[in-house]
Amino acid sequence: MLKKISILMFALLMLTLLTSNITQAQKRSSFPAFSIAPVLGVNFPLGDLGNVYKVGFNGGADFMVNLNRETAFFLKVGYYLLPNKQEIDPNGTNASMIEISAGPRYTFTNPKVKAELFFEAGLGAYMFMYKDKVVGNVTTTYESETLFGINGGPGALIPMGKMADFMVKAKAHYIFQKNGSRVIATGVMGIAFKL
């Protein structure tokens, strides 16, 4: 399943790059064709996931390809730390998650305002990794599972010059599993470098 999702995301990115280059060749514009933003933020596990894990940190990279002034596609690769609530399960261990998701982004523009508000929605793979308990000299082992999920939320780009924008965004991640779902809310910020 992970191979199929990664092939689908790669194909989507290549199609977006091709479409963007054709659009750029036909009509010159002032917006960038491509940008990359290293991001850092905070994640808030909600629901059942919030009963086991507490607030953690995340980091990653956000790639964006503009199709025109209002629409773009993004690809997000992120790493999330999920610290265990030791007061609930003293023998529990921390977990981590890797997100690989992609989707459209719609930007709300106004010629009188330099900042741009946007809303994005994506789908992708969420890989959870759990560390087994370490007792005495027992070797540590890891377990992992890959789940499918969707995400969405608002954000803003604030110009910092011709080469970079300050980006901030908040998203809700809804991750599907057999017996219900996992929900994580995130807030990230970073610098989007225009290439």
Image (cartoon, helix red, strand yellow):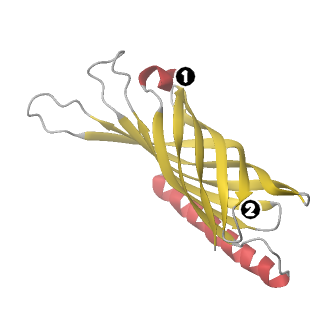
Point out the image quarter for the C terminus: bottom right
Please rate how many residues cluster around mark 1, counting C-alpha atoms within 10 Å: few if below 14, some from 14 to 19, many from 20: few
**Mark 2 touching mark 1, by CB under 8 A?**
no
* Disc number for residue 72: 2
Q: Residue furthest front?
A: 161
Mark 2 residue type: Ala
Q: Nearer the viewer, residue 35 or 180?
A: 35
Viewed as shown, does residue 178 lie left or right of 104? left
* Disc number for residue 73: none
- Position above or below: 113 against 132: below
The quarter of the picture where residue 8 lies is bottom right
Viewed as shown, does residue 68 lie left or right of 76? right
Q: Residue at x 56, y 36 (%)?
A: 175
Q: Residue at x 11, y 34 (%)?
A: 138
The quarter of the picture where residue 76 lies is bottom right
Residue 17: % across, % down:
67, 73
Residue occupied by mark 1: 47
Viewed as shown, does residue 123 lie left or right of 100? right
Q: Nearer the viewer, residue 40 or 139?
A: 40
Say what secondary structure mark 2 lies in. Answer: strand
Mark 1 residue type: Gly
Q: Nearer the viewer, residue 193 or 49?
A: 193
Q: Residue at x 72, y 55 (%)?
A: 157
Say what secondary structure mark 1 lies in. Answer: helix
From mark 2 to mark 1, how far is it between C-alphas? 32 Å
Could one spot residue 78 in this view of the protein? no
- Position above or below: 61 against 123: below
Q: Residue furthest bottom?
A: 25
